[in-house]
Every structure is written in C-alpha cells, then in structure tokens.
Amino acid sequence: MTVHTLLTDRTTDLELPALSSLDFDLPPELEADEPPEARGLKRDEVRLMVSYSTGDRVVHSRFRDLGDFLEPGDVLVLITSGPMNAALGATREDGTELELHLSTHLPADLWIVEVRRPDAVSTRPFYNAAGGETLRLASDATATLYVPYARDRHLPLKGYNRLWIATFRLPVALDKYLARHGFPIRYDYVKEAWPASYYQTVYATEVGSAEMPSAGRAFTSELIT
C-alpha cells in the first residue's frame, strides 16, 4: 500500500498531494543526459507520448508527428522567453567555491537567487549561506545575500534555506555580465556543459528565463511552419 502525504494550502484549505507521491524510478540509460543533436538526431526526432483522457489510451510517436494529433481549434502556447546564462561562479569569504543561480527579478532591482555548491558531477543545494554575507564574482563583481526567500511562511525553512533575496554589484549591465561570465543552469543528470545555443528554442524572441522551457525545445523551424 502506498501512503500519500498531503500538504494543506492554508490560503484555500485545499489538500494537495506531496511531490513525493509523484516519484518513479527512471533507469539511468533512459535519462536525457545529452541533446539529441549529439546523438545524430534532429530536435523533432525525440519521442512523443500522447495520452488521451478519454479511454485511458496512450500512443507512442515522434515529436515531428505532433501535427497528426492536433485538431482544428486546438491551441499551442509558446513561451517566447529564452534562457539566460543564469548560473554564475561565486566564492565565499573563506574561499568556498559556490554556484549562484538567478531565479526571479524583483522590484527595487532585487533578485531571488539559489546558492549551490559544485560536486563531482553537477551542483547540490548549499544550506550554510548566511544573511548579510557577500559573495565574490568574476571581474570584481559581488552578490550580497540579505534574507531567505520564504514562498510559504507556514513551511519550516530554518536551516534549509535554498532561496535568498540578493542584490548584485556589477561593472556592466546584467545582461552583458551574464553573457560574458554566466552559463546555463543544467540538471545533475546532464553530465557535460553544452553551449548556450543548445538551450535555446527556435522561437525565442527575448532573453529572460532562468532555465530552458524544455517542453518546447523539440520544435524545429520546419515543424512550426
């Protein structure tokens, strides 16, 4: 028997399933640890699973056949914001090497950031950051952490703060700085650092996302046309 733990949304009194109830085993050999182009495939040659709510039917296909499953009146929503080079190398006062991930730009030029620490493969959350500390960045830039960002004041965050409110002191505009010193955020199952172009969708018109809108990466210009 599987017991699902429920989290209560105190603003609406709705009971929501915990993320742990969605866990499943994914064999390492099936992880998407490199772009399809590196395997000699086009972007739209990746697999596509179509699930029908009526009849509990599942169809396995390729993304390039997406049009076969669309009907008149269907709507596709495309996120035209492309990913920034939202990861930056950072160093604490004691010399600890960290990685800073930009998340959300707030009013008053504040940022929500995540502090992480590099490991053998990728990075892991770093929980020892302290409010008020300043991290050194490349080209004499700095990032100052102020207070933890608590998305839900009812959740116990003490000692497990991943997100912080921060400001940056940079020698140039942020977009230029990220283009020069930043790099794309990648998941831990992606073993190799790929150029920023691999993270862009073909229909992006402006830069502004912290991470790649991966659901749309499989589109090619030919498929959209």
Image (cartoon, rainbow, N blue to C red):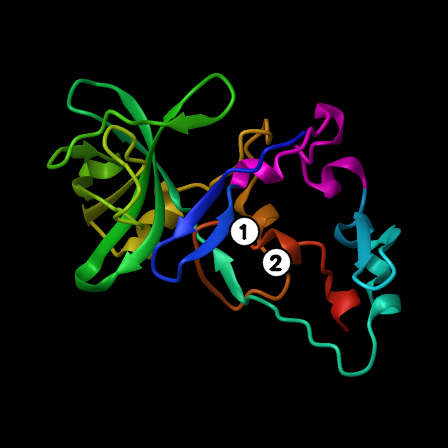
Magenta residues (range): 19-40
Residue closer to the observer: 17 or 94: 17
Q: Let me know if residue 32 is in the magenta part.
A: yes
Q: Residue at x 23, y 38 (%)?
A: 139
115 in the magenta segment: no
When the figure is inspected, residue 77 is found, relative to residue 13, above or below; the finding is below
Residue type for callout 2: Thr
Residue for badge 2: 201
Q: Marks 2 and 1: which is nearer the front?
A: 1
- Looking at the image, residue 116 sits to the left or right of residue 57; the answer is left
Residue 136 coordinates in the image, percent (x, y): 20, 32
The quarter holding residue 44 reads bottom right
| Mark sitting earlier along the chain (2/1) | 2
Mark-to-mark CA distance, 2 and 1? 8 Å
Seen in the picture, residue 205 relative to 113 is either above or below; the reply is below
Instruction: Say whether marks 2 and 1 touch (CB < 8 Å).
Output: yes
